[in-house]
């Protein structure tokens, strides 16, 4: 029989392409679920942040900022900013590319991540926020 377990976390961020390792939060949800085999989905409930799988090391953390600037440069004349008297259209656009969630399989209560893979949140917004993260564990 398949079961579902849900958990939530509030993650404080600094914005400006900050990368945060959510792997411990996902692992904790799997342990709390008591499930041994299935999938875990990590989702951020915001339109200016993304969740992905990445290596979590200082060089790559900085490289993500450069890539974000190439994908959707800050300071452009975006319609979103003009219509909403805002400064974060580039944040929304970067989040669109990365997406709000990832799903990872697990066996024996452990995520089947590669050696260096981590589940990470990237906050693209222009100022600090508290991000709501939803973790759902589905399995048996």
Image (spheres, rainbow, N blue to C red):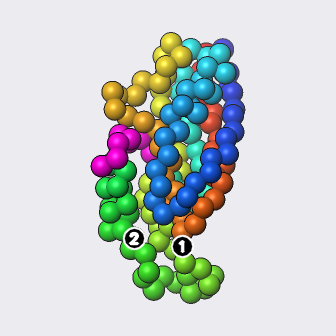
Position of residue 31 relative to residue 114, above or below, is: above
Q: Earlier in the sequence, mark 1 or mark 2?
A: 2
Quadrant of residue 118 in the image?
Answer: top left
**Residue 37: x and y, percent?**
54, 17
**Which stretch is magenta?**
52-59
Look at mark 1 in the image and give the residue it sits on: 88
Position of residue 26 relative to residue 126, above or below, is: above
Q: Does the magenta stretch include residue 117?
A: no
Q: Which mark is residue 72?
A: 2
In the rendered view, does 87 fall on the left or right side of 63? right
Q: Is residue 99 visible?
A: no
In the rendered view, does 121 fall on the left or right side of 117? right
The residue positioned 54% from the left and 68% from the top of the image is 126
**Residue 61: x and y, percent?**
37, 50
- Badge 2: how crowded within 10 Å, few (<14), some, or many (20+)? some
The residue positioned 69% from the left and 34% from the top of the image is 7
**Residue 102: x and y, percent?**
49, 41
Q: Residue 45 carries which label?
A: none
The quarter of the picture where the N terminus appears is: top right
Q: Does the magenta stretch include residue 54?
A: yes
The residue positioned 35% from the left and 42% from the top of the image is 57
State how far apart marks 1 and 2 are (Cα). Answer: 10 Å
Quadrant of residue 25 in the image?
Answer: top right
The quarter of the picture where the C terminus appears is: top right
What kind of element bears circle 1? loop
């Amino acid at each position: 029989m398949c079961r579902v377990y849900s958990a939530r976390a509030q993650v404080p961020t600094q914005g400006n392409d900050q990368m945060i390792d959510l792997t411990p939060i996902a692992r904790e949800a799997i342990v709390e679920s008591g499930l041994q085999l299935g999938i875990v989905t990590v989702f951020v409930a915001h339109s200016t942040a993304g969740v992905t799988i990445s290596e979590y090391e200082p060089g790559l953390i900085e490289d993500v900022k450069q890539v974000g600037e190439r994908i959707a440069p800050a300071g452009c004349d975006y319609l979103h900013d003009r219509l909403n008297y805002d400064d974060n259209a580039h944040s929304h656009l970067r989040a669109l590319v990365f997406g709000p969630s990832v799903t990872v399989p697990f066996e024996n209560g452990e995520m089947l991540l590669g050696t260096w893979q981590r589940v990470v949140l990237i906050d693209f917004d222009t100022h600090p926020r508290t991000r709501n993260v939803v973790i759902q564990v589905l399995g048996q």
